[in-house]
Image: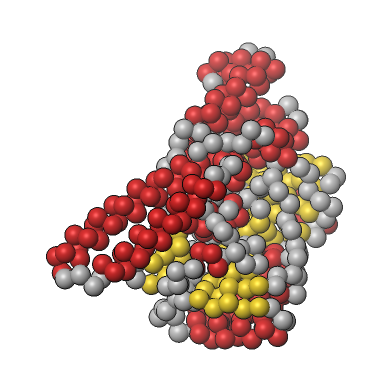
Amino acid sequence: MIAGEALERLGDDDAALIRYRRAAELHARRLAAVSEGREVFAADGDRGARRLVALLVRLGRLDEALCAARRARTRPFAAAAASVRDPDALRDYHRERRALDAELERAWELPGAARAQRRVELRAGLAQLERRLDELLLGKLPADSAGAEREVCAQPAPGVVMLVFYPSELGYLAFAQDVSGVVAVELVGELPTDPGERAARLLDPFAAKLEEATRIEVLASGPLTREAFHALPWRARALIERAPVAYRLDLPRPVVASAPRSVLQLVPESNLPGGSAEVLAAARVLRERGLSLIERRGDEDDLRQQLRVDLLHYVGHAHAEGWDSALELGGDRRLSARDLLAGPAPTLAVLGGCETGLPDPRAHGGGISLAHALLLA
Amino acid sequence: MIGTSSTVRDDLAASLVPPLLAALAEGADPAEALRRAQLDHLDREGWDRFRAYTP
């Protein structure tokens, strides 16, 4: 890295690029050995990729710079998204998990001290099982991962404007790409807190592209993953009034749009006064459109298998905590991000609880949230 | 996937989510389905906490 920076200062940009690429690859290899906190580690230690992106921008090689930024951003997800999962090992995990969950339920029937002791033992068993699952989900990259990385730099479809924000030494390198090409600017320093001024900094450099957009896709990193781009003021209205806004993980697979046929409505008991109104109204509109509706409270033995539906509608409490983010199903029951990653998963989901898509501002692509887990599953 | 970026009021969800699901059931793209539902709720605090996450 230091050598790359020295070469760049001496004006040998080609040699510096080689060094930066090498540093980025080395960081990617180190990443493969990290399981806990992989997404944050990926963002913290990617100085090589940052220098690479910045140098490519300075050289005017914007397509390459954008592609390098996108690769660095999605790298921590590559194994979880594309790993060749061992179906037998996953089946074993699900079987053992069901047994442990059942034992945790039965432990409530034990007398005081015995109950506490048994629950401690079972929770330790659960933590061990979850560590095994993490290894299973993140253990290896597929043999064709290089091909997958090439795909990640695919061009946007006609009408789509992709906004990419990647950290630089002075702030952010911001890119906008559509079928006509790429533009890039550096956003130096802190962003204004006033919404109008903030929107002007983030969006105005790309005004010409945004005026033509039929869809806007946001690929942010770091603290900007929490920015509500769709609500930013744009021409005196919210940006979403201009076009739909999607927050893209940037996985190497297409978005498949088709009308769902089966729906799972997952509604644990909760203290949400508006919850039952949402459930009833949703069930009515779904039935009116001929969808087959399955209802679950979250305490059923077959719950995980029932997640293999076209559409999941969740109404209940949830919280964000990376891989431990969870849909709260009542008592000790929960569906964590790693549970969702382990599949089976719905094709679409509307997760109505709090923080179900809350990004981690320390990670490039927002880290693992419940919504991201479902996209990766 | 439709998720939330913070806490959400359950009365807002009760009003916004059913039309969102209706649009999805009719085959609308998730980002477009959410946009349609949100445009009817721009005067409600917290409307912007729902987001469309895509692969």
Q: How is the image coloured?
A: secondary structure
**Vertically, is A62 above or below A195?**
above
Q: Residue at x 78, y 48 (%)?
A: A156
Q: Residue at x 59, y 51 (%)?
A: A376
- A282 and A274: which is toward the camera: A282
Where residue B40 sits, quadrant-wise, is bottom right
Q: How many marks?
A: 0
Measuring from the top left, give residue A28's x and y in whole percent. 55, 31
Residue B37 in view here? no
**Residue farthest along the left direction in this orientation:** A113
The N terminus of chain A: image quadrant: top right
**Vertically, is B25 above or below A233?**
below
Answer with left or right where residue A293 lies relative to residue A150.
Answer: left
**Vertically, is A40 above or below A235?**
above
Residue A17 in view here? yes
**Vertically, is A301 above or below A274?**
above
- A192 and A261: which is toward the camera: A261
Measuring from the top left, give residue B44's x and y in whole percent. 58, 78
Measuring from the top left, give residue B21's x and y in whole percent. 66, 75
Measuring from the top left, give residue A361's x and y in whole percent. 50, 49
Q: Residue at x 66, y 56 (%)?
A: B54
Q: Residue at x 63, y 50 (%)?
A: A249
Answer with left or right where residue A159 lies relative to residue A137.
Answer: right
Answer with left or right where residue A219 lies relative to residue A241.
Answer: left
